[in-house]
Image (cartoon, helix red, strand yellow):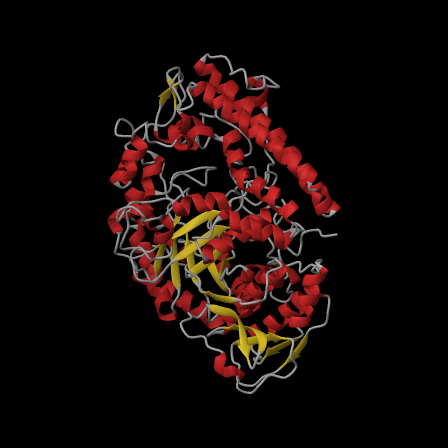
Amino acid sequence: MSNGYELWLNYQKVTDDALLNQYRSSLQTVYLEGESDTHLAIKKELQMGLGGLLDTEVVFQKYNGLGNTLIVSKYKDLPQDFKTIVTAEGLTEEGYIIKTAQLNGKSHVVVSSKEDVGLLYGTFHFLRLLQTHSSLANIDIMEMPKVNIRVLNHWDNLDRSVERGYAGFSIWNWHTLPNYIDQRYIDYARANASVGINGTVVTNVNANALILTPHYLEKVKALAEVFRPYGIKVYLTARFSAPIEIGGLETADPLDAGVIQWWKDKTKEIYTMIPDFGGFLVKANSEGQPGPQNYGRSHLDGANLLADALEPYDGVVMWRAFVYSEHDPTDRAKQAYSEFLPEDGKFKDNVILQVKNGAIDFQPREPFHPMFGAMPNTPLMMEFQITKEYLGFATHLAFLPKLFEETLKSDTYRKGKGATVAKVIDGSLDNKKLSGMAGVSNVGTDINWTGHPFGQADWYGFGRLAWDPYLSAEDIADEWLRLTFSNDDKFVEPVKKMMIESREAVVNYMNPLGLHHIFDTGHHYGPGPWVGNLSRPEWNPVYYHKADTEGIGFDRTKTGSNALSQYAPEVEEMFTNLETCPEEYLLWFHHLPWDYTLKNGRTLWEGMGLKYQEGVDQVRDMIKIWKAMEPYVDEFRHHQVSMLLNIQLKEAIWWKDACMLYFQTFSKMDFPKEMEAPEHTLEYYKSLKFPYAPGIRPRWD
């Protein structure tokens, strides 16, 4: 019985007897020469992987001259000229080949790379082939990552609370580090390496300067040493006011000579302890965080300050573009573009701007951020949220790679048709050397890491898309199900369909037809479309839906905020024209009357009710599908998912009832006959309070 701790690396014994015998007869001996820490990690993984899958002891032999190559064979002796057919030509440092090699009439499986880390990635891919019951005949695979920087962002605080975390406490036990190395740190590194993630930002973007003090750097060093064999670099969040808070300076002005020297000295100190330190992630002048604008300077000044300090060590600055100000009365969706576009091409070569997938804030559905189509001279990296801040926390099943894929496939039209967000992110559109993708982690101390067992698929899928942003969500779901649960198609096909449709179900019962940010405030748990009393306009849900007696929606066309002007003309025209605007974005870009006619002939008001009801019904279908899967899943995880799906249904009904009752106070219309009547009154739903909802942002005093 599995509790989910092993993630997709559970290496269950192959249950197909014919396939098991084929694998056993073909994979009796592993030839591996190296003794580096990464090679030792590869050896351990093969012992676990082959040992578990084949239920047999793995025999290792050395073969001089192989370098970063391993051979898995049924033969105990290899010819001396074997290495002549092994080549890593054409590979990047992280790339690898896996192929079936024939020599003297005998067949062998070869994994080869230029560097140790490539061999590690190739080993995980090889084991994945076995886990998914793939044939070993005629393998011919060459893989290289399309994105350079593939990182998890942990919004973990030093007290082990996790902002927007729904799977327990932070896995980093700062109190017992550096002397106590939890096995979970090692397994975390294995899991990330298995999907190609090569970096981790271990601290919250709402940063604490203490992480840069010697006391904590010693602890970070210990983590870096655990992660290094798995090809994972450590990054830290740099609090912009650190020179004042821990440096004793009177200012953090990025143009002040003392501040410049302080950051250079601090950076040198870090690299002396952690030679492969990745660099800094910075959130500045956003949501109350300090930054260069405190001193009348720009984001450019702040980013280049840190870039200069990191440059001698090949370190990188990931400067977040999630900025909005209470002093800017314009549409919040426009503010990041307005602040960063004038600086295009002026940042140092080791600066990459980290841009959220949409311009608001990780909503269940957002159009792609306009910055992706507007900054040809600056590297941009994607920031996705893996943790489900706005998608039901860790109690709702919503397969996020479908959301990620939707964004990556979006066409910016910056160089005409086909200029997709994926091509911006991997640097291919403008020949950028620096590229990246970040995912806000959903990892915690829960035994299964992610709270919801299906939350593991979001972590897995992020890693796979960071490696190759052109993969399909369907293929990722198929892979993950086979690795995690079962290879039986009678299980995989219906559950894969459920996963692929799950995110759309959440959109339907939360934010249909382009509604957005109507969550209850602070914790973002449940609906709160009526909230309008907060001090900053853009913190209030009423700011985003603008419901009144005339209609509903945010006008971002020329007659409204004109946010659409930030997109390419082709995109602007598509979203502006009601005939061509996809209905899933209708209320994102338009304020429309309640009796506006949708493409199906129903009114907007009826369409909203039908979408809310459809989302509820989709969750009921998920429950039925999962119940039928009981023969294929262990009792523990089947029961766990069943309970969570029942919570999801309860909360989907809550969303439907609360939102439709509230919006009815403006529309004055009856609910469509197909929509189930609300279970409670609007006053009841407005009275619900959740002061202890998980993941609430802590105060900074």
The image quarter in which residue 580 lies: top left
The vertical placement of 136 against 331, above or below, is below
Query: Can residue 247 be seen?
Result: no
Q: How many marks?
A: 0
- The one nearer the camera, 597 or 232, is 597
Q: Position of residue 622 (x, y in %)?
A: 62, 35
Q: Position of residue 652 (x, y in %)?
A: 58, 29
- The one nearer the camera, 557 or 127, is 127
The vertical placement of 688 against 50, above or below, is above
The vertical placement of 479 against 368, above or below, is below
- The one nearer the camera, 180 or 33, is 33
The image quarter in which residue 20 lies: bottom right
Q: Position of residue 321 (x, y in %)?
A: 36, 48
Name the residue at 45% across, 25% down: 533
The image quarter in which residue 690 lies: top right
Q: Position of residue 52 (x, y in %)?
A: 70, 64
